[in-house]
């Protein structure tokens, strides 16, 4: 290692940080400056980028979990000429490539981050993928010390320790300052070394602003001959390199004014002059490139998906579990994850047949989603399962930031949705999950109605490139569709024609809608029935056609009428509205009881549909 050459490069990165935050009039210079040395060391000495193929699948990965300090990463990438240096001044501006937090769409950045703790879980997923494929790449991630106050950090630490991810290296920027003051005063996280050690990690400490100590720390990590992940706890100085910013909490999230900018740049320019003799060596290091071996692509096996439709009533969670197992050979990149509920979500069927491709995260839904995101960045097709309340509710923010924003190919399959969860009561009866998932840009939402539709939907989901949320039930439902049924994401199905009114249903309410239509027929009412299995993107054309032809619509869903199917249908006809009645959960929580009784109590049954339609048509 050429210590003085790295110091020269790091000093140029620090100049870039000051330039960016001054121009943006916002940002986080303090933390960016404190990690500049380790970020420089990682990009120059450890990542060894293949500049001719930055997405080489065998490359080492880096995730900046403390994403607000991304100016340090932009700074080194600009010095390496992987990003246009002249555009650094556009940081945080409208239309700029340089977002306020890392974005996976930018060259040299392996993951979008910003929500603290999220990046750590994604890094664990990347490391897990390497283990599954028996690849040699390593994953490095930098966290802030204040960031370790997040629960997901310790979920990840526990996960990585138990999964023996010895290819994962976490680096803690221990400058003891966070937004509101000293970490030790706000909410002490010490002793960090003992905590990580207890979670089955190798622990190394060093001065993170000294290249000799950094090199010794990384050499020590590489000397470990065990199955543990490693953490380097770096003692650093917040604002390092700019005298008036050092150890000053006010520079956590504030930009310098013109006078401060001039002082900072003057100090850094002085360093440039003192290290000028190392400039040529720095340029050589910055422009060096590395080649990695090509990866062998696994060929898909030609396997037909044949199944016999259920004759009796069957819960869609059962059909889901069977489909995963039956489709595993067709999708070699499929990895199934669960959060200690595999017997209930029925992923246990896959786990028994393919234990090497099944990951149990324990009771840690957030890290399950983060790990899934990490797997997806490496080309895996992760399918994460839990109850709807936990998958959509507890993990919502991780889904938004780690799956939705970076547009990753993660499938979230939530069982035990709606009132029909039954005796467990309100805490487990998730009637808000569709509404939550609908708000995430690009999220596809599927709610199948029976055994056949569920199995076909699982296959369609695995073929689809992008984030999917599939809603599944605990309550057994009759078979609605025949074996020759064709399922297509985004295309609703007219199950019964009629011209007097249209009943639009989803999930287990489809069968109730059909029963209601038969009862209404005895009263001389000819109701059309539409199955909307894909709530997002919804089949606007089919809905608008029904609105035009039957003049009145009724929606039926085992979900809150706020934000669910009824809301989606309302939006679909907003420009050419017709009268609409919504049957669902009316802005209340559920309560304990047998599923069948609860459905009836909440009006989620054919009798109530008949009453609503009859009254609506008067």
Image (cartoon, helix red, strand yellow):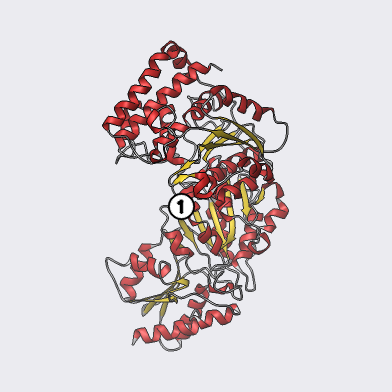
What residue lies at 30% left-to-right and 74% top-to-bottom?
578
Give percent across and percent down for residue 44: 51, 23
What residue lies at 53% left-to-right and 37% top-to-bottom?
174
Above or below, 8 relative to 551: above
Above or below, 616 relative to 443: below
- Residue situated in front as seen by the camera: 205 or 403: 205
Give percent across and percent down for residue 208: 53, 30
Quadrant occupied by the C terminus = bottom left
For the image, the number of numbered tags is 1
Quadrant occupied by the N terminus = top right
Packing grade of label 1 (10 A; few <14, some 14-19, many >=20) is some
- Residue situated in front as seen by the camera: 263 or 65: 263
Above or below, 6 relative to 529: above
Determine whether, in the image, residue 392 is placed left or right of residue 169: left
What residue lies at 64% left-to-right and 69% top-to-bottom?
310
Q: Residue furthest front?
A: 185
Res. 49 in view? no
Q: Secondary structure at mark 1?
A: helix
Determine whether, in the image, residue 479 is placed left or right of residue 530: right
Determine whether, in the image, residue 313 is placed left or right of residue 115: right
What residue lies at 61% left-to-right and 76% top-to-bottom?
423
- Which of the 4 image quadrants contains residue 483? bottom right
Determine whether, in the image, residue 475 is placed left or right of residue 467: right
Q: Write down the residue under mark 1.
A: 400
Res. 291 in view? yes
Give percent across and percent down for residue 232: 60, 34
- Residue situated in front as seen by the camera: 610 or 597: 597
């Amino acid at each position: 290692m050429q210590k003085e050459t790295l110091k020269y490069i790091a000093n140029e990165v620090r100049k870039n940080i000051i330039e960016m935050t001054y121009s943006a009039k916002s940002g986080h210079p303090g933390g960016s400056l404190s990690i500049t040395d380790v970020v420089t060391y990682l990009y120059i000495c450890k990542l060894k980028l293949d500049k001719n193929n930055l997405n080489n699948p065998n490359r080492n990965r880096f995730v900046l979990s403390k994403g607000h300090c991304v100016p340090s990463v932009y700074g080194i990438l600009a010095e390496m000429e992987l990003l246009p240096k002249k555009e650094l001044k556009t940081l945080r501006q409208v239309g700029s490539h340089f977002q306020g937090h890392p974005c996976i769409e930018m060259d040299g950045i392996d993951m979008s981050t910003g929500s603290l703790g999220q990046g750590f879980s994604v890094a664990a997923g990347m490391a897990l993928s390497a283990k599954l494929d028996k690849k040699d790449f390593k994953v490095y991630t930098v966290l802030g010390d204040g960031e370790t106050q997040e629960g997901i950090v310790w979920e990840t630490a526990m996960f990585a320790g138990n999964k023996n991810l010895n290819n994962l290296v976490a680096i803690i920027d221990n400058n003891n300052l966070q937004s509101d003051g000293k970490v030790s005063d706000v909410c002490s996280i010490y002793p960090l070394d003992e905590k990580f050690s207890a979670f089955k990690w190798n622990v190394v400490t060093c001065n993170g602003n000294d290249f000799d100590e950094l090199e010794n720390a990384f050499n020590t990590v590489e000397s470990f001959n065990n199955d543990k992940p490693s953490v380097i706890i770096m003692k650093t100085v917040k604002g390092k390199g700019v005298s008036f910013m050092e150890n000053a909490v006010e520079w956590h999230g504030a930009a310098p004014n013109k006078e401060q900018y001039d002082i900072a740049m003057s100090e850094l320019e002085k360093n440039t002059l003192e290290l000028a003799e190392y400039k040529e060596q720095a340029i050589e290091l910055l422009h060096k490139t590395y080649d990695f071996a090509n990866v062998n692509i696994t060929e898909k096996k030609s396997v037909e998906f044949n199944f016999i439709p259920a004759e009796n009533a069957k819960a869609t969670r059962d059909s889901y579990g069977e489909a995963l197992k039956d489709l595993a050979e067709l999708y070699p990149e499929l990895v199934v994850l669960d959060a200690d509920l595999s017997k209930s979500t029925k992923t246990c069927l896959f786990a028994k047949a393919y234990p090497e491709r099944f990951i149990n995260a324990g009771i840690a839904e957030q890290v399950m989603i983060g790990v899934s995101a990490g797997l997806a960045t490496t080309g895996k097709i992760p399918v994460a399962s839990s109850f709807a309340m936990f998958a959509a509710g507890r993990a919502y923010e991780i889904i938004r930031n780690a799956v939705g924003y970076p547009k990753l190919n993660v499938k979230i399959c939530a069982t035990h949705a709606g009132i029909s969860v039954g005796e467990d009561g309100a805490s487990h009866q998730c009637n808000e999950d569709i509404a939550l998932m609908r708000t995430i840009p690009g999220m596809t939402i599927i709610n199948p109605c029976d055994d056949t539709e569920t199995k076909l939907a699982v296959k369609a989901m695995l073929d689809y490139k992008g984030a999917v949320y599939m809603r599944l039930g605990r309550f057994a439902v009759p078979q609605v569709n025949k074996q020759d049924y064709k399922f297509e994401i985004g295309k609703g199905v007219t199950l019964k024609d009629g011209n007097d009114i249209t009943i639009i249903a989803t999930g287990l309410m489809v069968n109730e809608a059909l029963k209601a239509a038969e009862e209404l027929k005895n009263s001389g009412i000819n109701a059309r029935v539409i199955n909307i299995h894909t709530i997002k993107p919804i089949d606007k054309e089919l809905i608008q056609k029904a609105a035009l032809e039957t003049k009145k619509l009724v929606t039926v869903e085992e979900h809150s009428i706020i934000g669910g199917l009824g809301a989606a249908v309302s939006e679909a006809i907003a420009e050419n509205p017709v009268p609409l009645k919504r049957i669902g959960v009316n802005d209340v929580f559920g309560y304990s009881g047998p599923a069948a009784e609860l459905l009836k109590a909440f009006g989620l049954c054919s009798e109530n549909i008949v009453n609503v339609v009859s009254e609506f048509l008067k």
